[in-house]
Amino acid sequence: MQNTKNLEISTTKKIFENMDTGSLYEEIIKRNEGNILNTGAVAVNTGYHTARAAKDKFIIKEKTSEKNISWGEYNVPLDEEKFQILFEDIKKYLSDKDLFIRKCRIGSHNSYKMNFKVITEKAWHSLFVKNLFIDTNEKFEKEDFTIIAVPDFKANPKKHGTRSETAILINFKERIALIANSGYAGEIKKTAFTIMNYMLPLKNVFPMHCSANVGKNGDSAIFFGLSGTGKTTLSSDPKRNLIGDDEHGWCEDGIFNFEGGCYAKVINLSKEAEPQIYKAVNRFSTVLENVIFDEKREPDFKDGSKTENTRAAYPLNFIENAVKANSFPHPKNIIFLTYDAFGILPPVAKLEMEQAMYHFISGYTAKVANTEIGIKEPKATFSACFGGPFMVWAPEVYAKMLKERMEKYKVNCWLINTGLTGGPYGIGKRISIKDTREIVNYALTGDKTKIKYIKDEIFGFYIPQKFGETNTEILNPENAWKDKKDYMTKKLELAKMFLDNYKKLSIKDAEIDKGAPKI
């Protein structure tokens, strides 16, 4: 009988702690959890869940954290008694299972790091954690938080108070998170991120769902953006060094990466378009989730038959220009990326403070969704703080932290549309990646002291009349529309979408209100 300290989880079988990559490969193959491809990567199948089960996440309602949490769609309460019943059942379930344990950390900054113990029943989950979190040789007797992932355990909704057999529970009082009936490893990553999003504001650290890079002169930049906006692609600039691709903190010393790895979406990945990422995912140690491979064990990144959300988890040092440090300088520029499928937003606009807070809280992009067979039309998507499902405090708490730092460190904020211009989906054209890269490069490094701007009468942001070498004809979106009346009609529709979304958030803050569109 072996025990995992502090948690009273005992097993009659083996406990594998902090195994090296080669040993984990052996266990993965021995247990038929995956296949080694000829690239050296290991391919695994996550089962029924190929993405996050957002509706099955619960926060335990208890006195120490209750008043701080913004209860609602993403933070659904569950009482302590139900948590304890589920926890006891999981402990019984694990009593005759081999356990894989990783002691690791989240947060590169020594003052704000958190020590995590991650207990899994799958060897490949332990390898995923080794790749994604900061794998450290530091020894700690007591962890700050424990995550237990049991994909083969099914919750009982009547007994455990869950919505389904799948359950993701976070208990801030007990410092324990439980993940049941989901093999999708992204649940482990995002559960840790949600924990950091609650814990760090208590220390006056701003947690961010963003990518970040730094220039040779120490000019850091932050990229916010929802899926499909180009966040990973645009932050992975060979002329700059990659700090991290997804989760960061902003403290008095500067910005720092939470993770030690990358979790890249690899559907349609090609060597030509993204050579650095392609090289990283085709290596020993990389975990490929739901990636189809042929009889020669060659991965087929174009095949989305299992899911379009195919993923690769690999260490950060697999990216050649990636850098590690305790922290990096305060950013000089913040970029909000949006794919506007309505063709209304400009390729680049400068945001004043109120607009930056408003657009940060809105977290807008637009996707092309299949509404009926053969018919496609844009659909607006909003996610508060560009990461609504993972934000535990009210959105305005994070927005005010953004404001404080932008003011203190005199940071510029840019809204960049990587989507359409000249009309909505079916009429407009995609802003070229060449133009977008030129815009981003100039926003980060160009001399902008003499730029003249036009203030947009509805959204209030400032559109540059000239922006480096960017084609001036594309800067004002109205010029690209043949029918100016149609442009104004669609513009008002988009503005109303922003206002309707903001109304749902029930935010009462006069300063943030000033950044809203004016109809």
Image (cartoon, grey):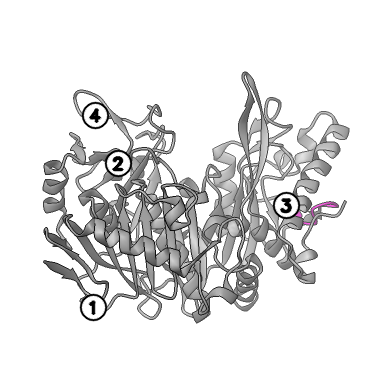
Task: Looking at the image, tell me whether mark 4 or mark 2 is earlier in sequence order.
Answer: 2
- Let me know if residue 460 is in the magenta part: yes
Q: Secondary structure at mark 4?
A: loop
- For marks 1 and 4, give the one nearer the viewer: 1
Q: Secondary structure at mark 1?
A: loop
How far apart are labels 4 and 3 at the CA level?
44 Å
Q: Is residue 28 left or right of residue 220?
A: left
Comparing 275 with 265, the one in front is 265
Above or below residue 424? Residue 360 is below
- Name the quarter where the N terminus is drawn: bottom left
Above or below residue 29? Residue 177 is below
Checking the image for residue 288, the label placed there is: 2
Q: Going 64% across and 68% down the picture, which residue do you hit?
A: 399
Comparing 161 with 430, the one in front is 161
Looking at the image, do the residues carrying marks 3 and 2 touch, with CB atoms under 8 Å apart? Answer: no
Task: Looking at the image, tell me whether mark 3 or mark 2 is earlier in sequence order.
Answer: 2
Task: Looking at the image, tell me whether mark 1 or mark 2 is earlier in sequence order.
Answer: 1
Find disc 1 in the rendering and name its residue. Answer: 140
In which quadrant of the rendered view does residue 89 lie?
Answer: bottom left
How far apart are labels 3 and 2 at the CA level?
36 Å
- Give the magenta part as a residue range: 456-462
- For marks 4 and 2, give the one nearer the viewer: 2
Exactly how many numbered labels are in the figure? 4
- For marks 4 and 3, give the one nearer the viewer: 3
Comparing 308 with 56, the one in front is 56
Q: Amino acid at mark 2?
A: Leu
In which quadrant of the rendered view does residue 510 lie?
Answer: bottom right
Find disc 4 in the rendering and name its residue. Answer: 298
Task: Looking at the image, tell me whether mark 3 or mark 1 is earlier in sequence order.
Answer: 1
Q: Amino acid at mark 4?
A: Glu
How far apart are labels 1 and 2 at the CA level?
30 Å
Find disc 3 in the rendering and name its residue. Answer: 501
